[in-house]
Amino acid sequence: MPNGKTHDRLTIATAALSLPIWIILTPDHDPFVYSVGVGSYLFSGIWLSGDLDTSSICYKRWGLFKFIWLPYRLLIPHRSCLSHGLVVGPLVRVIYFSVAAYLVARCIAALANRYFLIVDRAGILRHAGFSLTFWLVHHPMVFIAALIGLVLGGLTHTLADVLSSFWKKVW
């Protein structure tokens, strides 16, 4: 298996090489849409790596926030279909990260409400949910590009691991 730096270089190189494809395949050649796609690809490959279930560079990259990945590390076996599955792996990490970010935001709002000021947590979350839904309904291509980028970024990691293991067995 390639090490973390090799995975990072591969992710950056393939993202750069894929840019013309994103531009060609994006309807109306909207720069925002393909920027979201490539940005999601990079985020998935570098920050949401399939190696978050180990003490990897990607895990350490989260710094103070790596605690959010502790349950993931305990629940997801390394190189299982849930961590390294071609489509399932990246989707599991995206869903896990979304839930974790939501819970962290709730905790921060609760602490702010308790110690600093009055925060309408339910109102903030309701407004954020409404705004996100409204935005997704009116800009579906951005959502689709983000989803494709997130899946392909994780796919690159898994394919690098599979090809590396294959070549090691062959040689």
Image (tube, helix red, strand yellow):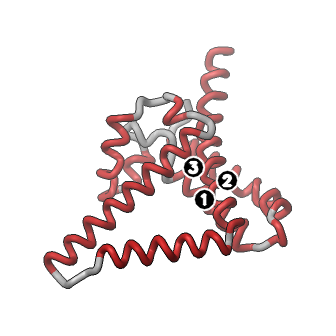
Residue 32's disc number: none
Q: Is residue 132 above or below residue 78?
A: below
Q: Nearest the camera: 61 or 96? A: 96
How crowded pointer 1 is (Cα within 10 Å; few <14, some 14-19, many 20+) is rated as many
Q: CA distance from mark 2 to mark 1?
A: 8 Å
Quadrant that contains the C terminus: top right
Mark 2 — residue? Answer: 148
- Hey, which quadrant is residue 113 in on the image? bottom left
Residue 40's disc number: 1
| Residue at the image point whose x is 68% and y is 51% from the top | 13
| Residue at the image point whose x is 72% and y is 57% from the top | 16
Question: Mark 1 belongs to which amino acid?
Answer: Ser
Q: Nearest the camera: 94 or 50? A: 94
Q: CA distance from mark 2 to mark 3?
A: 12 Å
How crowded pointer 3 is (Cα within 10 Å; few <14, some 14-19, many 20+) is rated as many
The x, y position of residue 29, in whole percent, is 82, 70
Q: Is residue 135 above or below residue 71?
A: below
| Residue at the image point whose x is 47% and y is 71% from the top | 129
Instruction: Kindly check if marks 2 and 1 are in contact, taking CB atoms under 8 A apart as contact.
Output: yes
Mark 3 — residue? Answer: 45
Q: Is residue 93 visible?
A: yes
Question: Mark 3 belongs to which amino acid?
Answer: Gly
| Residue at the image point whose x is 35% and y is 78% from the top | 123
Direction bottom: furthest residue: 117
